[in-house]
Structures are given as structure tokens and as C-alpha cells.
């Protein structure tokens, strides 16, 4: 059975019930709902409290850093103590709209690394167009981070995959790894005990369902593509990824 280690279930509104009800049929064992704001972190916890097989992370996404207040960070700190919260995330740096709020992003990122430390929780990292700054901050805080932690939706290259694994991160792949232009050459060099699977639903639906709204059930296509690339049986990949996910999200049962 697969764990979708990163999804945004609040997007589906009332339809989330259908997704959770179908989990068994879809071969899904757990889904981890990811927070990006104070408000949806709070709602994610409510969702996790409603459904046994759903867990939650809390955190503020880099693009909201500039408008983040001290009160917001205090609230994330408070929510981090809730039972079904298994990580702080997604947090990190995103410069794809330019780098005008770089300093705010770095500050909010570092403050959330420290919140995770206080709660002994792993972190789930989002980085886009900012890999070298992200790496520098994670390296600087290596002693503060609870490992293993997660590089989410990894789409850099083999060199950086190795650098992040050397720090103590696991590498998580979502649907975009199946896309024609994605670099998959280094997948064979990712040890099976360092790999996670996710959908990042509703975004990044894998091939051959690209263009559709993504859902946790689509994760099998991502798993199959990675397994083909690694030349291993998909069930073997899934068994490893699931075990790895429990090692990261230690509070998940
Ligand atoms: Zn996400």
C-alpha cells in the first residue's frame, strides 16, 4: 500500500470524502495533507481529526512570507503541538516570481526550522528557482533539523540530490518526474531507503493523466515510472517508500 506523503486535500472541498472513502481501493494507506498558510494548516488538522488515515503538516509557504506576522508564526508553533501534526511544511524558498521578498522568505523559513526543532518534528522543504540559497540555509541549520526530513517534489539534479541526502534528507518525487522533459538520469543513484512518493495534488498530475486535476489515486503512475527507471518491481519501490515515509513522519501510526 502506498502513502501519498504530500497532498493538498482542502482543495477538493466536500469531495474529499470520496477520495478518502476510495483509499483502500486505490491502494492508499495514508495521505498527508500539507499546510501552506495558518488558516489551511488549521483546517488540515480538522480534516486529519475527521479521517483516521489522514495526517497533517502545518507551515507557511515561502510566497506568503512577506505578509507573515509574528502572531502567524506563534500560531504555527501552537498548531505544531497537535496530535496528528507530523511535520512542519511546506516551508522553503521560491524565487520564481523574482527575488524581491528574498529576505522575508529566508527569515520565515529559518523561524519555522526553529519551530520544528522545538517540537522535534521533521521539515518538508519546497524550493523553486532557489536551490543554492535553500541548500545554504539547510546546511547552516543542519544541527537544528530533525532528520530524516523531506525535499518535496524534487526536480533539481543528481548533484543536488546527493548534497541534500548527505545532509540527511529523503528525496520525494511527484508527478512531474514523469514528464517528458524531466531529468530522470539520476534516479538509479537514489538509494531505495531514501525515496518518497507524493502527488502534490491537485497539482502536477503524472503522465498519462497530465493536464487533469491530480488526485492521490494517480500516485501509482509516478511509482511505476520511477520503478521502470530504476529497473525494479513497482511493489518493491512502494514497500520501500512506505517504510521510509513512516521513518520521516514518526508520529504517524
Ligand atoms: Zn505542495
Image (tube, helix red, strand yellow):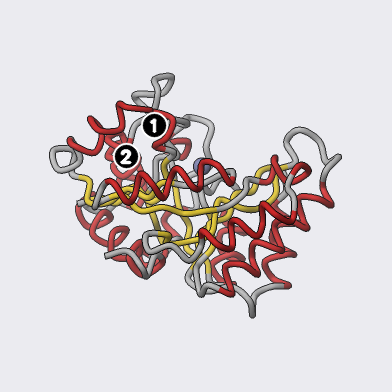
Pinpoint residue 127: horizontal percent, then vertical percent. 64, 48
Task: Please tell me how many numbered marks the rendered image carries.
Answer: 2
Q: Nearer the viewer, residue 71 or 65?
A: 71
Find numbered disc 1 in the image and state the secondary structure of the residue it sits on: loop
Please give the residue where the numbered disc 2 appears in the rendered image: 219
Residue in view at x 71 percent, y 63 percent: 110
Residue in view at x 47 percent, y 70 percent: 148
Establish whether ligand 1 lies closer than 8 Å to the Cβ of label 1: no
Find numbered disc 2 in the image and state the secondary structure of the residue it sits on: helix
Residue 199: quadrant of the picture: top left
Pinpoint residue 82: horizontal percent, then vertical percent. 43, 62
Badge 2 density bin: few <14, some 14–19, many ≥20, Cα 10 Å: many
Pinpoint residue 7: horizontal percent, then vertical percent. 41, 42
Q: Is residue 91 above or below residue 64?
A: below
CB under 8 Å between discs 2 and 1: yes
Pinpoint residue 64: horizontal percent, then vertical percent. 70, 41
Please give the residue where the numbered disc 1 appears in the rendered image: 206
Residue 96's disc is: none
Q: Which residue in the rendered view is the most extreme toward the bottom?
A: 143
Instruction: Judge left or right: residue 170 versus residue 17.
Output: right
Badge 1 density bin: few <14, some 14–19, many ≥20, Cα 10 Å: many
Residue in view at x 28 percent, y 42 percent: 224
**In which quadrant is the C terminus drawn?**
bottom left
Instruction: Judge left or right: residue 149 versus residue 249.
Output: right
Q: Is residue 33 above or below residue 74?
A: above
Instruction: Judge left or right: residue 128 versus residue 204.
Output: right
Q: Nearer the viewer, residue 53 or 214?
A: 53
Residue in view at x 55 percent, y 42 percent: 39
Q: Which residue in the rendered view is the most extreme toward the left?
A: 25
Task: Pick whichever of labels 2 and 1 is earlier in the sequence.
Answer: 1
Amino acid at each position: 500500500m502506498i502513502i501519498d506523503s504530500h497532498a493538498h486535500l482542502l482543495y477538493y472541498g466536500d469531495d474529499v470524502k470520496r477520495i478518502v472513502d476510495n483509499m483502500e481501493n486505490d491502494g492508499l494507506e495514508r495521505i498527508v495533507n500539507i499546510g501552506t498558510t495558518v488558516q489551511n494548516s488549521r483546517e488540515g488538522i480538522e480534516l486529519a481529526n475527521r479521517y483516521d488515515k489522514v495526517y497533517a503538516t502545518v507551515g507557511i509557504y515561502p510566497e506568503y512570507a512577506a505578509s507573515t506576522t509574528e502572531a502567524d508564526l506563534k500560531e504555527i508553533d501552537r498548531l505544531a503541538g497537535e496530535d496528528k501534526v507530523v511535520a512542519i511544511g511546506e516551508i522553503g524558498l521560491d524565487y520564481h516570481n523574482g527575488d524581491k521578498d528574498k529576505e522575508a522568505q529566508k527569515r520565515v523559513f529559518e523561524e519555522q526550522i526553529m519551530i520544528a526543532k522545538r517540537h522535534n518534528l521533521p521539515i518538508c522543504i519546497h524550493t523553486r528557482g532557489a536551490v543554492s540559497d535553500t541548500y545554504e540555509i539547510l546546511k547552516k541549520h543542519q544541527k537544528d533539523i530533525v532528520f530524516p526530513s523531506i525535499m518535496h517534489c524534487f526536480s533539481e539534479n543528481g548533484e543536488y540530490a546527493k548534497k541534500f541526502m548527505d545532509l540527511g534528507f529523503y528525496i520525494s518525487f511527484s508527478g512531474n518526474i514523469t514528464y517528458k522533459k524531466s531529468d530522470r538520469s539520476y534516479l538509479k543513484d537514489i538509494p531505495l531507503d531514501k525515496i518518497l512518493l507524493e502527488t502534490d495534488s491537485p497539482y502536477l498530475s503524472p503522465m498519462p493523466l497530465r493536464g487533469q486535476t491530480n488526485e492521490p489515486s494517480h500516485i501509482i503512475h509516478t511509482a511505476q515510472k520511477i520503478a521502470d527507471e530504476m529497473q525494479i518491481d513497482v511493489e518493491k519501490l512502494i514497500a520501500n517508500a512506505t517504510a521510509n515515509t513512516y521513518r520521516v513522519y514518526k508520529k504517524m501510526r
